[in-house]
Image: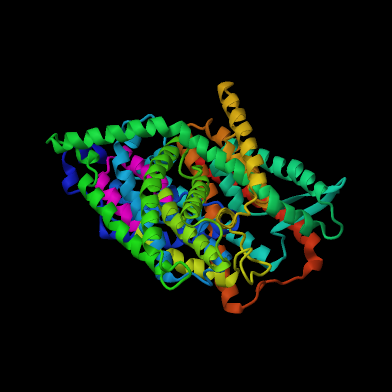
Amino acid sequence: MTEAVGKAAGGAATARELTFRGIALGGAITLLFTAANVYLGLKVGLTFATSIPAAVISMAILRVFRDSTIWENNIVQTVASAAGTLAAIIFVLPGLVMIGWWQGFPYWTTAAITGTGGILGVLFSVPLRRALVVDTPLPYPEGHAAAEVLRVGSGSREGAEESAKGLSVLVWNALASVGFAVLTQTRLVAGEAAVWFRTGAGATGISGGLSFALLGVGHLVGLSVGMAMFLGLAVGWWVLLPLLTAQAPQAGDLAAWAGGIFSSEVRFFGAGVIGVAAVWTLLRIAGPVVGGVRSAIAASRARNAGHALALEERDLPISGVLLGSLAMLVPIAILLWSVIAGGPLAGSEAVLIAGAVVFVVVFGLLIAAVCGYMAGLIGASNSPVSGIGILSVVAASLMLVGLFGRDQDAGTTEALVAYALIVTGVVFGVATISNDNLQDLKTGQLVGATPWKQQVALVIGVVFGSLVIPPVLDLLNTAFGFAGAPGAGPNALPAPQAALISALAKGVLGGDLNWTMIGWGAAAGVCFIVLDEVLGRLGKLRLPPLGVGIGIYLPMSAILPVVIGSVIGHFYEAWADRRHDAEFARRMGVLTATGLIVGESLWGVAFAGIVAASGSDAPMALVGDGFATPALVGGTILFLALTALLYRRTRKLVG
């Protein structure tokens, strides 16, 4: 009898599931993956899903214990993935440093913003589990993949061998990624190169990064998203930038001129595309979400009427969810009061806190449903949570404009911007966690886990993540700083989403937002939506409009490696589909990409510590700028050779 069948037959009462060692192991993995996600998100505005690598590591460690179970491994990946996903809060909070409101990241304030939103995200999505996880045709691609990893690795000899192969791929690819990243810091190989050139009266450029992390991201997002990002890259760099620079011709430094136009004009065009694409997503799923909520309420009433539910269907009690949600509003109110007290907004505590709490509840409930549905539709990794953040900060800022107007002095306006970012941070915590936990609950449903135990593990994961994120943010801020922040150095991390979200808040509250480019971007977003729908009806490769928006918004050096990675991943998937065990081959591809991401990202955190300790921006540099050309040529050759070697090794292990 299999474990799942044994549990359903009555073994669940004694089966190991929510154990201390599982929580401890999930917490240990949290330290690594959360730090990696914080660094990657600040560098390129992208994070990676941690469920599958956490499950592989868990199985490799827990299989030495004879009494370990598939459900205990599921708890480990649940804790680790919740904490790792919460790292997306860095799409908002660095904005407080960028506007000069914070000089660093106050530990408890940062943890409170992150934790309260994350726990609300868990609670808000509990009533949605039955509608969006059980009684649904949604595919949940990552939830199914993680479930397959757990099933295959849960005790059979074949599973143990697969777990060992998967861990081997993860470790070796991470080491190769670390090694190459170390070489880029010595400057013996180039990490990035850019060429700027004139196009008549205007200018544009071509740039690319030699980054294994970005290559791995491309593999995971897939060809459809990769091509959408390439379309955005082409529109932003080879259409918009030449046109806009031609309207404001300048002599001198091409990089400074064209780069400035990109930041001040092209990015806001991309924000318009992202905003419209996010609204379109909300409209498309409104009907299914309402129907799902009704189904969840009906199921709750049936349970209260005395109808027995199997262990696999038992959620946290709805009364506890309601009381817990109301209880979380108390620390949120205290947090907001601490932000207001003694500052320019003092005296307006009642209206500000009341407005913010209502906003968090209403907007939080909406995006919990939206993000959960999007995760089920396209996976947590591809879900456009950043677009939700953009809508949230604009809505929060407009709420403050409605309460206070725009005719405020500079100090009050800055305080209102900071307040809007903090409120958005709480709401963003709801978005990121609800985006992740329904994916985890789908995994649990497929392996026969107990939902309420997973929901408790999700809360624990949020707490772990909230405690880890503040010191990592502080370390990276000390070592690098953030582009656009006061005193930022040449190696400052771009933190693209945080820069955009803080700029939107300042623009809405200050009245000087670049509405023209946002408007044109919104119009273009409608065109991209139509294009995607037409391609879908024709059965062609779709181009998600949110992917197009991201391709316009992010620098080419970050987008191009992702596009290349998506093409490599496409060819690998085509090869994997021809294998005897195609599912195993595809999982090994996912682990190949994950190892590339984890290695470079963790090295980035370690390097931040070296920079902070040494006080130098380039503590490992062995050569100067005169070695740039050999570094670029040699680095490109080495990068391509390592990529080919690592994928070939994976294919050999697959057989």
Q: Farthest residue in the top direction?
A: 538
Q: Residue at image x 34%, y 54%?
A: 119
Q: Position of residue 588 (x, y in %)?
A: 49, 43
Left or right of residue 252: residue 309: left
Q: Nearer the viewer, residue 150 or 549?
A: 549
Q: Quadrant of the N terminus?
A: top left
- Residue 529 lies, with reference to residue 347, above or below; the image says above
Query: How are the colours assigned in the image?
Result: rainbow
Q: Nearer the viewer, residue 600 or 476?
A: 476
> Is residue 449 covered in magenta?
yes
Q: Position of residue 328 (x, y in %)?
A: 30, 57
Looking at the rendering, the stretch of residues picked out in magenta corresponds to 432-461
- Residue 142 lies, with reference to residue 111, above or below; the image says above
Q: Nearer the viewer, residue 527 or 341?
A: 341
Q: Position of residue 572 (x, y in %)?
A: 58, 38
Q: Farthest residue in the bottom direction?
A: 614
Q: Position of residue 410 (x, y in %)?
A: 58, 66
Q: Residue at image x 26%, y 54%?
A: 324
Q: Residue at image x 45%, y 44%?
A: 380
Magenta span: chief secondary structure: helix
